[in-house]
Amino acid sequence: MAERKSYMDRIERLKKHVLDTRPEMDLEPAIILTKGFQEMEGQPNHIKKAYAFRKQCREKTTPIWPDELIVGNAGSKQRGGLLSVDKCWSVLDDELDTINTRKYDPFYLTDEDRKAFEEIIRPYWAGRSTYEQWLVQCPEFAAVLRDCGALYINRKAVRGWGETTAGYENVIKKGMKGIRAQIAEVMDTLDILKAGDYEKITYLKAMDMAAEGIAELGHRYADEARRQAAECDCEKRKAELLQIAETCDWVPENPARTFREAIQSFYIYQNCIFMEQNAASYNPGRMDQWLYPFYKADLEAGILTEEEAQELLDCLWVKFSEQCLFQDKVTAQFSAGYPMFQNVTVGGVDTNGRNAVNELSYMILQATAEVQLYQPSLSVRYNMAQNPDKFLKKIAEVIKLGTGFPAFHNDQIGIQMVLNKGIPLKEAYDWNPCGCVETNLAGKQRCYTAYADFNCGSAVEFTLLNGKSRKYDRQASIETGDVLTFDTFDKFYEATKKHLAYMIDGTVASSHVNDDIGFQNVVPALSLSFNECIESCKDYAWGGAKYNLGNGIDAIGVADLINSLMSIKKIVYDEKTCSMERMLEALEANFVGYEDVKKLCDMAPKYGNDDDEANAMTAELFTFIADYIESFTSKFGKMTPGILPVSGNTPFGIEVGALPSGREAWKPLADGISPNQGTDTEGMGAVLKSISNIPHGRYTQGTLLNVKMDTTFRENPESTKALMDYLKALCSLGVFHTQFNVVDTETLIEAQKHPEDYNGLLVRVAGYTAYFTELGKEVQDDIISRTNHNAIC
Amino acid sequence: MKSSMTGTILRIEKISLNDGNGMRTVVFFKGCPCRCAWCSTPESQNPDREVYFMKQRCRLCGACVAKCPNGALSFSEDNSTIKRDASLCDNCFTCVDVCNYRAQNIYGKDMTVAQLMKEIEKDSIFYFYSNGGVTLSGGDIFCQTDFAEAILEECEDSFIDTCAELDMLTSQENVARIIPKLNTMYIDVKLMDDELHRQWTGVSNKTILENISYADTICKKNSIHIRLPLVEGVNDSRENIQATADYCATLANCVELEFLPYHRLGVHTYEQLQREYTLADREPMTRKHVYDKVSFLLEQKLPYQIRISSLEIYDPVKGVIPVTEEQLTE
């Protein structure tokens, strides 16, 4: 064991402060925003929004908590959940009585906040929010599919943009001063007498107001630090507070000069974009790259030591875990655990395509190893051709700590994904993981990377029931014919594809409506870090970014789909050991009284075991799905496929009856591209071989594989090397991503029984890490039941 | 046709780290000439496929009892489980077919050389990155020498690294066919005293020791690893340990003597096979127990490495390797 670092006491205190704080609704920003809109009646929407944002910057409380070196938050509370009232005020209205106690991600709502909601927020926003427009405008056939649990298409209507990587480097390097100068330069080229320029002028004014607000917020934190310093008896803390004041007086207004200023500038801006819109997945991205010049210069100048730099990173890491994502009760099931999905990545290659690993890459991995909280979502881009083994070894060592981090990304496939979006190679080299496993480019890309999900389990059910939902006993999809008339497996297979296509149709149609409504959801504070948004005087919402893409559409239940089709093929058509009539009866009865059929289903070949036939079907079907999704183009570009469930496999499972795969009714579907729980009997190698049949590079919004290993894995002296070998094999197979849970099953079961003893227990849910005890019971059960691999131990 | 030759395989374990270099595919053959009292894989002893019963899955529906053509199955007296009369069961597997809950199962599966090679080749990418390969285990592959030889030839042809875990009770001719094709071998030397060997394993060690000495003359250089599964009161005497160490020193190609602490992880398998486990009263050993028993060897300047369940404690070049209490208690 290395010697305990001197700053770890501070980090432990900071952590405790966060862990001891319960998530609460924080309506301060929403109240200020509402007043701001009221003061700007008659102005264009973007002026109202920018004015209200600046008002938030000017009026919000500026708390600085004990021991902090990096300051800032998006509201008034430490673990607050924000509400984007302009987008979806009514989400909270629907849950006023239940928000404190709901099953997934409860938030405490104070009486005071409830009163403000009823007296200030509701009266103003009723009838004005875009969520209300969405509910009315959602295409009917998509709404039917949604209501039958085949689609989840509401997610983007109930929170802000997110799912993007702001141009943090612009903010840090130029400061708000530089950005305002850039805005002024463009403003000089405009002429109100020229058609179209009026809108541009007002938009630039809006952006400038936002930049002004961000700069002022820095000074307000400086004021608060000075106020606390004056009252502080402890000389050491007083000095720290004065240094905070000095830092915040300079950034984010001015270009950062030091490592500390760069981090502080970034973090105030990060909170500003959360304050602008409650949204998940604003991704810091490649921090080891954009912080490195500051780190190197400070070390050379002798004004920073390695240990001080590590302490600052660790302090920031605790801050990342403060903000809590507020979502409605349904959406919360799809991504449970309050995660803000702030994805930080290290490693990969530079813009010359060469090794980009530097000292900070290791220190950032170390920050996660030391702090062990659920944010940031730490990812690595591992480039097998370029990155050193030492880096891979560090990755393996941090994985073995069992926090679920880092998520491992095969860099070469990540680059391939970005290329497949139509982005040139030189820029693709600079990609970063976004949210869970989506691909992104800092300050350049606009789309919902995970716009909506479709339920692959439903596709099988619709084929069996001629388009009906079993649970709702309602025609949800198209009629593809009575399944009893299908005399060949091909007919069954083709019918399933038709339902998949119809569900994708519904998703695309809803996406077009959301794109249209989304033009109102302007975000000047976010847009000001996108160079092209300034140059074109166009908001992020209007397609101002350099690369505008079609939204991401995610398949959920990959293994359920393949396993069900394989079962039907083997049992009903190839071996004829069970008739289709009997299969239908068995499924309707949820296998009760049909145990012989259940056995046949269970014993049919399963996805995840490197079975030739299942592999071939996987490749064919997922090529079809990618082809079909990519055949659609939105206002912004080609639609983009992905396979990441977050935790959506659980709520989708609740909508689907028994399946021919042997999965019982209403149980969770498989997560991501992972095999069905407990069916991957051939071990971790076979899982990789199986999933390599999905054309990963074409699923440009990422593919997600969960692997859980028991704790004995950690103890084996060979396991670091074995894990490195395994990850290299993964890269060679063209698999994109994997993440590991290394908590043992016994611990999880204990934690479920005695949550009070397991406050800080982290588990990888799917694309993110959450506190196990804060997850709903079904999600907990799902994690417990994932096959416990101990092959590498 | 060699590729259509059939063998009986108990199971295939993939990405194993404990059976040779790197990540390995371990192929367990059915059939073993020994009946070691401590055997942890009794399901590998019978050369043929056989039925086993998983009590926890059984719902006591009685289908197997009703359908057994030989009347070998019955409910236990307290109706809590199903019993099998081994003398009546002829392994027709009717019970397996009629059991809807997969409580009645089969150990063993017939595979052709081509089928097994296909399984082995599936993991070639893992062999590549970890310097792994195939380990033939059992049972004992000498119960199916023709099949094993065909597999080893195929592996050699595809440059797949080969290793085997051997008991060496076979003809000298079989030894000559198999040993030169192995890059690494782990050979059990259970007891040096023949009388005791017969008592605890049911067979003499005379042929075994002769075969090992012969193998030493025809094997690849430095390819022999000797294993001694150490069981209290059976083979853990100082005399036996010394005799084994001395024997290893006579083998020019022996690079390692590994002591394996006795464990009872196979006990439930005896239950599944409805067989008696005769060592039920023995305590499992830790590395620490083993260390105390074998550490007197460390000063003998032996020409090979000594390990306790993969933990290195002595190397002929480096000398005694210090180990921590923590490593020994794992």
Image (cartoon, coloured by chain):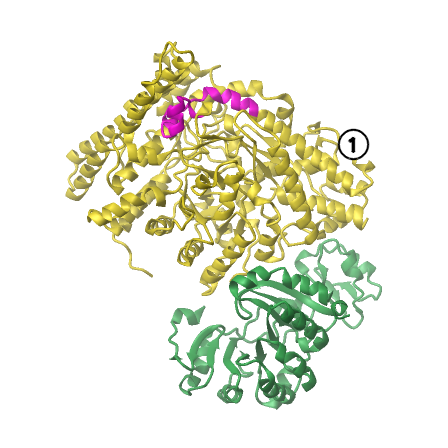
Instruction: Report the magenta stretch's main SS.
Output: helix
Q: Quarter of the image holding residue B107?
A: bottom right
Please name the residue that numbered disc 1 is placed on. Answer: A481
* Chain at tag 1: A
Q: Is residue A434 above or below residue A447?
A: below
Q: Position of residue A421 (x, y in %)?
A: 52, 36
Q: Is residue A547 above or below residue A669?
A: above
Q: Which of the pair B315/A599 is nearer the observer?
A: B315
Q: Position of residue A120 (x, y in %)?
A: 39, 16
Q: Amino acid at mark 1?
A: Gly
Q: Which residue is depicted at the point 73% across and 51% down?
A: A599
Q: How many marks?
A: 1
Q: Which residue is depicted at the point 60% across and 25% down?
A: A509
Chain painted green:
B
Q: Quarter of the image holding residue A541?
A: top left
- Look at the image and say whether residue A358 sits in the magenta stretch: no
Q: Position of residue A578 (x, y in %)?
A: 80, 47
Residues in magenta, as a range: A512-540
- Look at the image and say whether residue A533 sits in the magenta stretch: yes
